[in-house]
Image (cartoon, grey):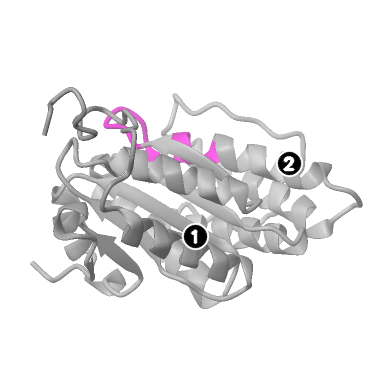
Amino acid sequence: MNPVQNPFSPGAGSPPPALVGRKAILDQAQTALARIKAGRSEKSSLLVGLRGVGKTVLLRTIHDEAEAQSFQTFFIEASESKPLTNLLLPPLRNILFKLDRMAGLNEGVKRAFRVLKSFISSMKVGNEDFNISLEVDAETGTADSGDYEADLSALLSVVATAAASRKTAIALVIDEMQYLPENEFGALIMALHQVAQKQLPLVMFGAGLPQLVGLAGRQNRTRNDYSTIRPWELCVKATPQRH
């Protein structure tokens, strides 16, 4: 093929002229979004592959599709220098403000603000770089135990419940997940597991380098709570294996 006309050009998230050979991935994502919006449970998905195979472009396309389906959604990129909490809470706060601005008072949204305040208060301990505030009283006893896994699960469940009360859904889109420490990755997957068990309208689409498979495999208790998609294998759906 003429190199000038070749649509494949590896880069850091640069969109190609066409997403050739990615229809199966996008179809799976659209099905997951439709099921979540319809109130049915669905596994979250991880896109795993080397740099340049199109993971970020696919994530952004999925993010745009979620927006087109009226999801409350955001795109974040995991970092070696920032805890997951610092990246996750500001957009969750923004989503709650959007839900709060919808017509009519809603106790589910008000409660989500209180639980978010509880979570923030517990996470500020030992995290001097974290600075986010809410002018509400915390809900004592929810998401404030100091156990990151339990508190994140409680927070996402309450936020998803607030979204359900507003007849909408949430899609978390997270790139570069290989940078997450094992404890943060495990806590996030467990939180998503509990959300799915309750059939709440929240789902995650993530992406990372191949070492993410090993990270996922070490979380044996969560191995059936998400799907792993490898773009270079023609999008075959698989679950992580124990290592």
Task: Name the image quarter holding the N terminus.
Answer: top left
* Residue 88 shown in magenta: yes
Residue furthest left as drawn: 243
Q: Is residue 201 left or right of residue 146?
A: right
Query: Which corner quadrant of the image does residue 53 belong to?
Result: top left
Q: Is residue 85 left or right of residue 166?
A: left
Is residue 121 visible in this depiction of the protein? no
- Counting residues from the start of the chain, the first of labels 1 and 2 encountered is 2
* Residue of label 2: 98
Task: Decide which of 18, 103 is in the foreground and name it.
Answer: 18
Q: Amino acid at mark 1?
A: Val
Q: What is the magenta range?
A: 78-89
User: What residue is shown at x 42% (from left), y 40% (from top)?
Assistant: 60
Q: Amino acid at mark 2?
A: Lys
Task: Decide which of 5, 242 is in the foreground and name it.
Answer: 5
Q: Is residue 15 left or right of residue 65?
A: left
Residue furthest right as drawn: 104
